[in-house]
Image (cartoon, rainbow, N blue to C red):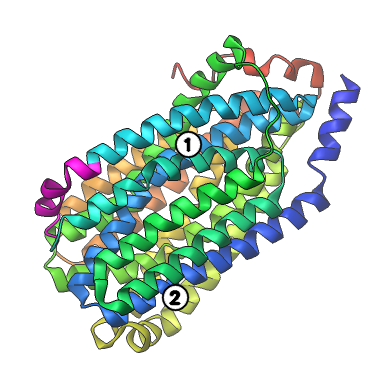
Amino acid sequence: MPGEASTANETVDAKQLATGGSILGVAMILANAGNYLLNVFLGRWLTPAEFADANLMVTVMLLVTAIAISLQLIAARFASINEVSGDVAATDSLARWLEHRAGAVGLVVALILVAGAPWWAEFFNTESATPFAILGVGMPFYLVQAVGRGVLQGRLTFGPLAATFVVEMLVRVITGVALVALGFGVIGATIGLTVSFVATWLHVRHLSTRSPGEKPDANVVSDLLRYALPVGVLLLGQIIINNGDVLIAKRFLEPTTAGVYAAIALVGRAVFFLSWSVATTLFPAAAQREEAGEDSDGLLYAGLGIVAAMGVCFVGGAKLLGGIVLGEVFGPEYAGVSNPLAWYAFATSLFAMANLVVSHHLSMGRIQEALVLVAGGVLQTALLLIGRSSIDSLIRAQVIAMAILLGLVGLSHTFSARRRGVPATSATNSSTRTERPLEGASA
């Protein structure tokens, strides 16, 4: 209906998106800067082997982040759709339903980490099992807060959403630095992680003003569960690609070399995490435009341009200054890594662009590109296992895999656009979009 289309147009106004995206981008830069400050501190105070253990805790957290982001994206998409119709109560009831499930999943993850801590420590060659147990305690809080973040994202309230990332970073840095300085080492850094999860949960809960309501409609829950499948596929691909190399390096490289690789990966992945602010901004806007029957590919192309520019700047900076900076900041063991760091950043830039295309399609319920992402993760893992003997061979495997992935995702997007015919012209047809099977689900 024309009225619905105009509402969507107002909601995803380009100026509002640019302002909100800028706020979120600045917050993500601050959050990442703070997290890097913490890692610089850890790199100076811990030995390379201890730093590898601390980085492993971050990597385990990032594995669970995949579940958290799944919950956030699900909440964001349905909140953004409800914003078009103005049904605030539906979003609130769905958020409560999701939070209960998120808490249950968090308890399961906590049990896996706490009960399995001795085994995990032996498998990954860590000095102590205690950090795994400490990290497990924070998992229920971490997953529940992700739902609240998703609601803020779906409603395009980027200012409060941005504040949650800054709060998480500040608590993590202050607590982690204080405890490590007091001599608690890897355990102190892990406590900082866990405390930051609890603080973020409290902050998100404070921001979430929920109206009392009934349980969500059964049809809405059915749509949500159906949408969870492609979200899970996307995050499975992200888990494999973003974290597989660090886990393989920790498992097969000797401790000092694994610590150097962890530093390269930590810095090189900055491109992806900074690009996530672009994906976070565009995701609900694309979903709302799809709901109103409008084309959203222009948002995607603008986002790709921004991510590509980030990548060029980061690769150039890594090539020129990477080894010098890491050597000065972390210590002489980390000097001389400019070339591998630049190639790692290049591989991460390719992945960030592919991920943006996939998340764009996912905002509209299309699963095909997410399946391509998982295939790219499987290819990368196979190449990593073949080249697990050195830092250079591990990075080379990722460059090859991510170049192939971006090419395949680009082709899939092109074919999908031709099949759909863009731009869409009827908002009336979009009113039934959430009732249609997911595109590509039967492929």
Query: Mark 2 sits on what residue?
Result: 37
Where residue 189 appears, as percent x and y from the top left, is 32, 66
Horizontal arrangement in the rendering, residue 422 relative to residue 352 (left or right): right
Picture quarter containing residue 176? bottom left
Where residue 131 appears, as percent x and y from the top left, is 24, 57
Within the magenta stretch, is there residue 171? no
Residue at the extreme top of the image, as rendered: 218
Crowding at dot 2, Cα within 10 Å, few <14 / some 14-19 / many 20+, comes out as some
Number of labels in the image equals 2
Whether residue 19 is visible? yes
- From the image, which quarter does the C terminus lie in? top left
Query: Which of the two residues, 44 or 255, is positioned nearer the viewer here?
Result: 44
Crowding at dot 1, Cα within 10 Å, few <14 / some 14-19 / many 20+, comes out as many
**Figure check: 316 above or below 227:** below
Within the magenta stretch, is there residue 114? yes
Query: Between tags 1 and 2, which lies in front?
Result: 2
At 85% from the left and 25% from the top, the residue drawn is 4
Query: Which of the two residues, 437 or 76, is positioned nearer the viewer here?
Result: 76
Horizontal arrangement in the rendering, residue 150 relative to residue 186 (left or right): right
At 45% from the left and 16% from the top, the residue drawn is 442
**Figure check: 72 above or below 18:** above
Asked whether the beta carbons under mark 1 and mark 2 sit within 8 Å of each other, the answer is no
Query: Which of the two residues, 187 or 263, is positioned nearer the viewer here?
Result: 187
**Figure check: 206 above or below 435:** below
Question: How far is mark 1 from mark 2, CA to CA?
Answer: 28 Å
Query: Mark 1 sits on what residue?
Result: 70
- The type of residue carrying mark 1 is Ser
At 17% from the left and 51% from the top, the residue drawn is 385
* Residue range corresponding to the magenta coloring: 113-126
